[in-house]
Each structure stands twice: as C-alpha cells, then as structure tokens.
Amino acid sequence: MTATTRIVERIYSLAQKQNDLALMMGTYRFFAVTLYYSGDFQTARDYAVRGLQIWRSGGVRSPIVELIAPAVECLAYQALSEWHLGDIASCKTNMAKAIALAKELNDMPGLGLALYWAALLAQFEGDLHEVERLASDLIELSTRQTLANWLPGGVVLRGWVRSASGEATEGISLIEEGIRDYHAIGAVLRLPYFLTLKAEALHLADRTVEALEAIREAGRLVERSEARWWCAELHRVRGRFLAAMGADETQIEASFSEAIRIAKQQKSVSLEKRAQATYAEYRRRKASGSGGRGFRLPLC
C-alpha cells in the first residue's frame, strides 16, 4: 500500500505540473479509496470531494478508458466515509447518486461497486430487507456481467440475511462460499468484514467459540493488509462474544475499550456510538447481576 501510494503521489505531482485534470481526479480517487480502507475516513472523504469537484467542472477529458468511472467511485467512497463521520442523510443521498450515475454511464463494473457498497451500508444499519434487495441485484448483475470481484460480496450478504432471519445453516454456508470465492481471486481488503459477518452468524447458531476464531483470523488479516476500516468492530464484536461466554472481565473490558479507542482515533462517529452502546449494555447487565452471559449481537 505504501509503495503504491508513493507512486501515485509522483503521478499526482506530474499531473499538477501539467495541469492534467484527468490524472488529478484519478489520484484523488485512489487516495479516497486507500485512505478509506486504512481507516482515515475524514481525509478519504476530502479526497473524494476534490475528485468530484474536478468531474463537475466539466474539464476532464481522459484518453484512458477506466474500468470504473472515477466519479462513481468518488461518490461511493464519499458516502461510505460520511456514514462513519455520522452524516447518514448525505451518505444515503450520495450512494444513490453513485448508483444512478453508473446506470447513466452504462458502467457495469461501477454499478457493481455501487450496489455492493450500498448493500454494506444497509447491513451497517441492520436493514435486512434492503440488504436482501441490493444483494439480489448485485448477484444478478455480477453473474450476468461476470463481475468476479463483486459477486462474492453479494453471496456473503445474502448469507448474513439468511442467518439473521433464523436460517443459520444456509446462512453460514453462503457466507463461507462467498469468502472462499473472494479469497480465490486473490483479494483481501474486505475479508475482515466478511469474517465479522461469519462470526455473527456462528454466534447466532450458538457456535461462539468458532465465532471468536473467525474474529482472530480477521485480526490477523488486518495486521497483514493494514486494512483497518472495520477494526473497531472486530474488538466490539469480540467483547460481546467474550461477555456471552462469561469470560474474564479484564478481557471483556479491554475489548470494548479498544473498540471505542479505535473508533475515536478514526473519527468514526457511527462505530464509536455502536461500541459505546454495546459497552453500556454490558455494564447495565453486569450491574443488574445477570453479567454478560446470554449476550446476543444486535443486527448492527
């Protein structure tokens, strides 16, 4: 990631000297994506907005055929960053714009990207119906257009819906299928998130020991890839599993504290609120004498 970033920085410097707006927009798009995955949501949003400003100026005439229209990608990552920063209304508006623009441009890979991230946003909010709708659209599009990068995500999300709806066996099977297919194409950045969904499904199926192992695997992937965008959630979910198992209080407290610390550091208002709420519920149950045993993960 770092070496690639240095290369793009040099390209951006050259683009500035030549006043090449297409190259400048491409580098803004790259920084928005890279910084989002690294967990710097505020700066990711800023770069996405800069890219969109160039696009809206009407001055971009790129001789390069992009796999995904940069404007679609900038809109999607602006929306994702806004969710973390707590601007939910703007987030939903901009993701809808990303989908609409991809359709307008007949950009099928871009539409796959936008549908995928829109489905994730719905999952972030625990909206089962919307996740199922968007995952179905994504699976249909990806199958028809052979979009191998986006199809596994649709399958994982469909599995999450099945699991959350009480169909644990089918749900876990679909999630594992999607993870295998995603891993098979050599991708890694979204694996910690997929493994978190697998862990939730295992927990709901009363397989919490396996769920904890899935979270540990996700943590190892984070360290190798430096994709820390879902890192706060790994610690929150781990704390919830440990509480459900009646684990040592020091471990539980450490997990929730780390989730809150990381969310604050990344300025993820949404994940900080979620971690604080889960921790408060744990403390409430502990004070009432019931402890953390029986803790069930909410859908979001």
Image (spheres, rainbow, N blue to C red):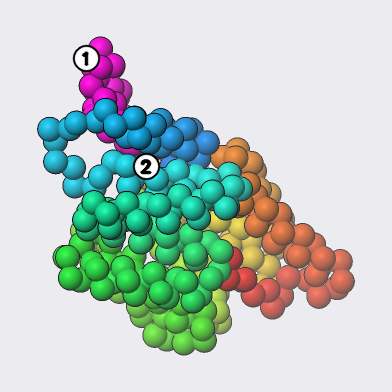
Q: CA distance from mark 2 to mark 1?
A: 22 Å
For disc 1, the neighbor class at 10 Å (few under 14, some 14 to 19, many from 20) is few
What's under tag 1, amino acid-wise? Gln
Which of the 4 image quadrants contains residue 143? bottom left
248 part of magenta stretch: no
Residue found farthest to the front: 58
Describe residue 234's horizontal placement relative to residue 59 as left or right.
right
Residue drawn at x 26%, y 73% is 140
Q: Which residue is mark 1?
A: 18
* 84 in relation to 13, above or below: below
Q: Dot 1 lies on which element? A: helix
Give the position of the N terminus as an image quadrant: top left
**Mark 2: which secondary structure?**
helix
Tell me the amino acid under the disc marked 2. Cys
Could one spot residue 203 in this view of the protein? yes
Span shown in magenta: 4-31
Mark 2 sits on what residue? 74
